[in-house]
Image: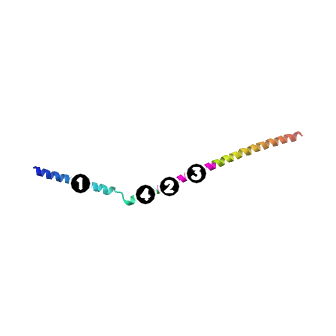
Amino acid sequence: MNRTEFIITTAIILFVAFAMGWFANWLVHRFTRVRQSDVADLDRMSQELHEAEETRDQAITYLQQREAELTNQLTQTEAELAAAMDGLRAARHEAEELRAHMGRT
């Protein structure tokens, strides 16, 4: 094999390697490219996720407010119950004193 044949053989081998690389690259990009419908689906899903997060945040805020209202109402009811129990206790004590006083006379 002389020098010219070696150069031509090397050039052909390099060209075939280049062509195979280019074809492999084309195949990879052909099968992995993102379609417009996929991008639209991702946009729609991200919008729905954002709306769901907003709804969740609103629900959490509402539940916290409702919990605070109910806690306040419970505290007021317990205070009213305590006051009623104190009043009842005082009324019973007064009734016992009146019975005792009526019993002496």
Mark 3 lies on residue? 63
Secondary structure at badge 3 equals helix
> Marks 2 and 4, how far apart in space?
14 Å
Q: Amino acid at mark 4?
A: Asp
**Residue 1 appears anywhere in the view:** no
Residue 50 part of the magenta segment:
yes
Residue designated by label 2: 52
Q: Earlier in the sequence, mark 3 or mark 1?
A: 1
Horizontal and vertical percent for residue 90? Answer: 78, 42
Q: Nearer the viewer, mark 4 or mark 1?
A: 4
Q: Is residue 72 magenta?
A: no
Q: Which kind of residue does numbered mark 1 sit on?
A: Met
Q: Position of residue 38 (x, y in %)?
A: 39, 58
First reached walking from the N terminus: tag 3 or tag 4: 4
Q: What element does badge 1 sit on?
A: helix
Residue 82: name its quadrant. Answer: top right
Q: Is residue 81 left or right of residue 105?
A: left
Amino acid carrying label 3: it is: Leu
Residue 20 badge: 1
| Range drawn in magenta | 48-70
Mark with earlier residue (3, 2): 2
Side of 9 where 101 appears, left or right: right
Residue 43, disc: 4
Q: Are marks 1 and 2 in contact (CB under 8 Å)?
A: no
